[in-house]
Amino acid sequence: MRYRFEKFERKYNFQLPDSYRLLVTELGDGYAVGNCEFFPTSDFIDNNLRLGGAMEVGLFPFGGLGNGDCFCFLKYGENPDEYYIALWLHETYNYVILNSTFDNFIYNCVIQEYKALLYPQEYMAEGTREEYEECIEKINSVSSLMDFDISAIEKAKNEEDLNELIIKRDPYAVQLLCMRARKILEVGNIAGEKYLNRAMYFSPNYTAPYYIMGKYLLNKDKKEGINLLFKAAQTPVAASGYSYWDEDDAGIPKSVLEEIFNIILENESLLSEEQKKSPFMDFIRQQRPYDSSFRFVLVEKYIRDGNYMDSIKELNNVLVLTGDYKLKIKILEMLIPLYEKAGLVWASGICRRDIKYLKGLK
């Protein structure tokens, strides 16, 4: 079947990875590998899979876990390779960044299939011969299609070996970097700093690496630790890195911003004068990081100052924090001209589509 991928690409200024096109064309709708069951491709192309008002504007769901959580492309720039693969969590409206490319995500999925062979009690429903054969068939067929070398996978003896293969192939597997860094920093291995610096470089708007590194440095270089936590405080609410899944748990609390705000306020004297006088520090002093009305006041300040990008970030925060559908629609209507002033016309189109979605729920 021929899909009109170019329709999606023109509308959202996002060149889909060749590997995504190949996989859904060859293996079809509803194909499942690892934890991901792919959504119908026609629905993806028509952008019918977004939950308007619950998802940040740059998220494009392409598959799911079957419980409401969605695997998404997360577009963060205008170049073809400027996207992440993220898992969006339907219970909390936040996401974790899994991989840097779609190819690496599919490699990750093949690893998940191999984990099922190593740990059938944990990953298989009953551990039957049919389940084993299905796992092996998926590993072989997907690896053949994507030209993966599975010899290294077959030599892996445990989960740690498999995670090492993921990082070796994808050095910007951000959530896994954060998980590994936290684990080795706890035992005093400073190599964890390297992983976190890499994660911060690749995902500068993601809370988790700043939070882990900032807290780690509080007992070594407190001023730098507070500086990193101030950066963590300014990341989008949805980009926390919190996960209720054990396999993606990097130790990020569900209400991580509350802890970060408290630490900053207890150590405000260590901030620079610019940080102390900033509008965002005024917001921190109110200690209401998850209150949409307080965020909205910050939005109004940024708009008055002509600060469009921070206005966009904070409006997206209000969007995912409020449960008021009328306010969600208002926020999306406010975002449209801001995105257009910023030259992000594709994003204004998503806002219009999300407004239609929300009005259909009323």
Image (spheres, rainbow, N blue to C red):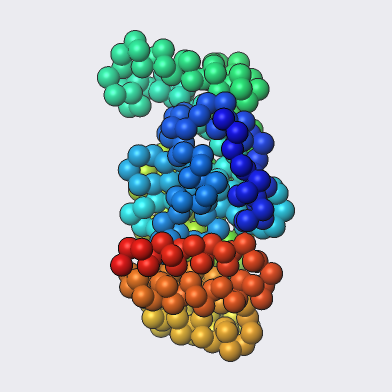
Nearer to me, 170 or 361: 361
How many numbered circles are shown? 0
Q: Residue furthest bottom?
A: 304
Name the side, left or right, on which 149 lies relative to 258. Answer: right
Q: From what the image shows, is residue 141 above or below residue 10? A: above
Q: From what the image shows, is residue 203 above or below residue 267? A: above
Nearer to me, 111 or 177: 111
Name the side, left or right, on which 105 lies relative to 247. Answer: right
| Residue drawn where x is 36% and y is 57% of the image | 92
| Residue drawn where x is 44% and y is 77% of the image | 330
Q: Residue furthest left?
A: 126
Residue 313 point in image, percent of width and height:
54, 70
User: Can you tell which quarter of the image residue 25 is in?
Assistant: top right
Report the quarter where the N terminus lies: top right
Q: Residue furthest top?
A: 129
Residue 271 point in image, percent of width and height:
58, 78
| Residue drawn where x is 56% and y is 73% of the image | 336
| Residue drawn where x is 35% and y is 47% of the image | 68
Name the side, left or right, on which 338 lies relative to 175. Answer: right
User: Can you tell which quarter of the image residue 359 is in?
Assistant: bottom left
Residue 85 point in image, percent of width and height:
55, 45
Nearer to me, 131 or 61: 61
Q: Is residue 286 visible?
A: yes
Report the quarter where the C terminus lies: bottom left
Name the side, left or right, on which 347 lies relative to 297. Answer: right
Q: Is residue 220 visible?
A: no
Q: From what the image shows, is residue 110 above or below residue 172? A: above
Residue 129 point in image, percent of width and height:
34, 10
